[in-house]
Amino acid sequence: MTLLHEQHAVPATPPLLSGWFLALELTGRCQLACAHCYAESGPTGDHGVMSLADWRDLLTDARALGVTRVQFIGGEPTLHPNFEEILRHAIDAGQTVEIFTNLYRVRDTWWDLFARPGVSLATSYYSDRPAEHARITGRPDGHGRTRANIIRAVNLSIPMRASIVEILDGQRVEEARTQLAALGVTRVRVDHLRGIGRGARDRPDVSQLCGRCGQRQFAVSAQGDVTPCVMSRWITAGNLRDRSLAEILTGETWQGAVAQVSRRAGSGCNPGSDSDDCAPASTEVCNPAYDD
């Protein structure tokens, strides 16, 4: 018996955002008041207009479109009143989640969530000396709190990375790196101050970016704005209150937003999603390899 027509499997169309990275800027509020904050966040910042339902819908839509990597940032993401619910939703949706937090205050109930498979932490660390760290962050007790929570995360075997941004002349950057290594944090990246947010002398411009904004990554602000990256937050492609995520990322405005970012391959820039202590740091997308 012969078949008149052979059946051939039709390859499935890859999801629109397969392999993409999403940064959620949950809030503009932060306990710290860093003078160089790219997001210009601080104690008087607000949580924006995105509701818990909005964040859940975004995560659900992003997952359906192929996004499997999510980063929570801010401001300080843990200050959002629905932080825990949003995190649980992302975990339940099967996304890997990095929480970029200043580790200033961690509720006891969060440690079990942070220890879940697929969840990791990132933080900024400016110096091995509390006074110098405080000079940058504006909180005299910040260094001790952050250091204690780094130790706890390492002891719980929670994946952890750190970023050191060089702000001050003579800042003890290498000493900070050495101290982090002694604490058990070996994934450390160093960056210089970038002219974005409160670090800008004038208006921000694309010369301060790595050139990869919008390349298989995007960010959503607490106002619902979709941008190519948290570091290019002044370049918006649309708002989720007006259009769906798929409509925004396939539209001409998105293409135009991405085109504004200069392509400077090999620039060595590693901006990323620092949290409330607000400095360019290194994301997995911008810098797939970290110093060991």
Image (cartoon, rainbow, N blue to C red):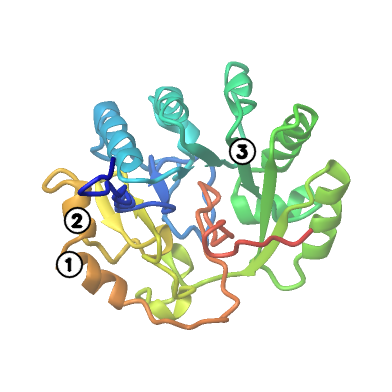
Q: Is residue 266 left or right of residue 87?
A: right
In terms of sequence position, does the residue under pointer 1 or pointer 2 come before the other? 2
Q: First in sequence: mark 1 or mark 3?
A: 3
Image quadrant for the C terminus?
bottom right
Task: Locate residue 83: give its quadrant.
Answer: top left
Q: Which residue is mark 3?
A: 120
Amino acid type shown at disc 2: Ile
Q: Do the residues bearing badges 1 and 3 touch, measured as CB atoms within 8 Å?
A: no
The vertical placement of 113 against 228, above or below, is above
Report the residue marked by disc 2.
248
Q: CA distance from mark 1 to mark 2?
A: 7 Å
**Residue at point 57%, 67% (across, down):** 270
Q: Quadrant of residue 233?
A: bottom left
Classify 285 as above or below 182: below
Identify which residue is drawn at 67% across, 41% down.
142
Q: Which mark is residue 263?
A: none
Closer to the camera in the image, 273 or 264:
264
Q: Nearer the viewer, residue 114 or 172?
A: 114
In whole angstroms, how far apart are the C-alphas of marks 3 and 2?
Answer: 29 Å
The disc placed on residue 253 is 1
Mark 3, secondary structure of its residue: strand
Instruction: Work out how far the residue at label 1 is from the one at label 3, CA to CA, in angstroms.
Output: 33 Å
Question: Can the viewer see residue 172 in this picture?
Answer: no
Q: Residues within 10 Å of mark 3 (few under 14, many from 20)?
A: many
Indicate which disc, 3 or 2, sits on the residue closer to the N terminus: 3
Residue placed most toward the observer, 78 or 203: 78
- The N terminus lies in quadrant: top left
Secondary structure beneath label 1:
helix
Q: Residue furthest left?
A: 242
For the residues labelled 3 and 2, say whether their Cβ atoms are less than 8 Å apart.
no
Residue 32 visible here: yes
